[in-house]
Image (cartoon, rainbow, N blue to C red):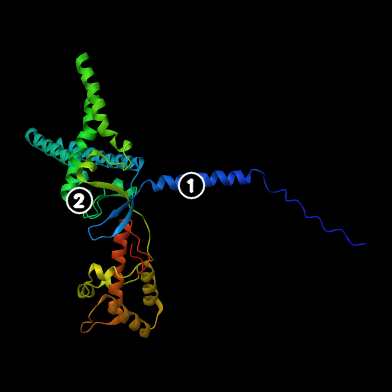
Amino acid sequence: MSAAPPVKPVDTSRRPGLSMEAAVQRRARLAEEMRVSKMVRRLVTPEGAAIQLRLGSASERAGAFLIDIAIQWAIVIATFVGLGMVIGAMSPGSANVAFAFWLVFFFFVRNFYYIFFEIGQRAATPGKRVLGLRVAARDGGRLTANSVLARNFIREIEIGLPFQFALMGGDQFGAWMGLFGLLWSGVFLLFPIFNKDKMRVGDLIAGTWVIKAPKAKLMQDITSAAARPETGSRFAFTTAQTDAYGIHELHVLEDVLRQSTPEIKAQVASRIRAKINWTRTEGETDLAFLEAYYAALRRRLEQRILLGDRKTDKYDVR
C-alpha cells in the first residue's frame, strides 16, 4: 500500500486583501502618470529638433513666487534697517537724500528683481531655481529680453491691482467699485489655474512657458581640459560636432579617459575625429583632444537635458 502524498502546508501569512491593495496602488500610480503626462508638451526647435518639456504646476509656480517675495522683502527690510542705523548721524538734508535713494532702490527691487534673474543664462529667479523651474520660449528659440520684459511688466496688473482694489475703502460707492475691480483683476491673478498650460497672462503675451528643469545627472566630470585655458582655446567644437554623440558615448569616453591604454586612446580619438570631420592640428595630442571633446560633449548634453531633451546615444535622432 503506497503512502499518501504529503499535504502542502497552507500559507497563512498571505492576507486576502493583498491583491486589492496592489490594485489600489496600481490605480494610484496610473493616475499619477496620467497627471504628469498632461503637463508634458512637445516642442520643435527652429533647428527642427523635437523635445519634450514638462510644465511647472500652479502650486510649484506659487511656491517659487512666495520664495521670491520673501527674498525681496528680506532685501528691502535689511537695507531699510541699515539706513535707519546711519541716518541718525546725518544732517536733515543728507537724510532726505539717503531716504530718496532708498525709495529708488525699493522701486528697482520690486520691479526689476525678476527681470534681472530671468534675463540671465539660467532664466530663473532664486525661487524658481529652488523648485527646479525655469522660463523657456514657446517657439523653442532663445529666450529674448523682450519676452522677459513683457512677462514681468504685466505682473503689476496681475498681482498689484487685486491688492490695490482689496484695500479700497471709503463710501459705499467706493466699496462697490473696489469689489468689482477686485473681481475683474482676480481673473488675471487666477489665470494660471484655469488654463491647461498653467500660463500667466504675461506668459501668454510674451510667448513663454515655465518648465520643470530636470535634474538628470551625468557621470562625474573627470576632464582636466577645462582647467587649462590654452587647451580650451585650441579646441572649438561646433554644435553639430557635439551633437554627434549622446550620453552612452559620453560614459564610454569617460571610461577610456580613466583606464585605457595610450593605444586605445589613439584609436578612439581617430574614430571621433573621423566622425565629426575634425582636422588634427600641429602639436595636438590624443589625450588633449579627448579631454576637450569630453568637456564640450558634456556641456552640450547638460544644456539639452535642461530643455528636457535627453539624447541617449548617437542613434537617438528624436
Secondary structure under tag 2 reads loop
Mark 2 lies on residue: 119
| Amino acid on which disc 2 is placed | Ile
| Residue shown at the point (20%, 73%) measured from the top left | 233
Is residue 271 placed above or below 309 in the rendered structure? below
Foreground of the two, 280 or 139: 139
Q: Residue furthest bottom?
A: 263
Q: Nearer the viewer, residue 67 or 293?
A: 293
Task: Name the one closer to the observer, 99 or 259.
Answer: 259
Which image quadrant is residue 189 in? top left
The part of the image, by quadrant, that contains residue 111 is top left
Q: Earlier in the sequence, mark 1 or mark 2?
A: 1
Q: How many marks?
A: 2
Answer above or below: position of 288 versus 67.
below
| Residue lying farthest to the right in this orientation | 1
Judge from the rendering whether residue 253 lies leftward or rightward of residue 174; answer left or right: right
Q: Which residue is mark 1?
A: 30
Between residues 70 and 91, which one lies in front from this camera angle? 70
Choose top left, top right, bottom left or bottom right for residue 317. bottom left
Residue 15 in the image, given as x and y percentages of width and height: 67, 45
> How would you rate the neighbour count of disc 1 (Cα within 10 Å): few for under 14, some for 14-19, many for 20 or more?
few
Measured from the top left, where is residue 96 in percent x and y? 9, 34
Residue 171 visible in the snapshot: no
Residue type at numbered disc 1? Leu
Q: Residue at x 28, y 64 (%)?
A: 300
Toward the top, the furthest residue is: 172
**Residue at 22% in and 58% down:** 46
Q: Where the C terminus falls, by quadrant?
A: bottom left
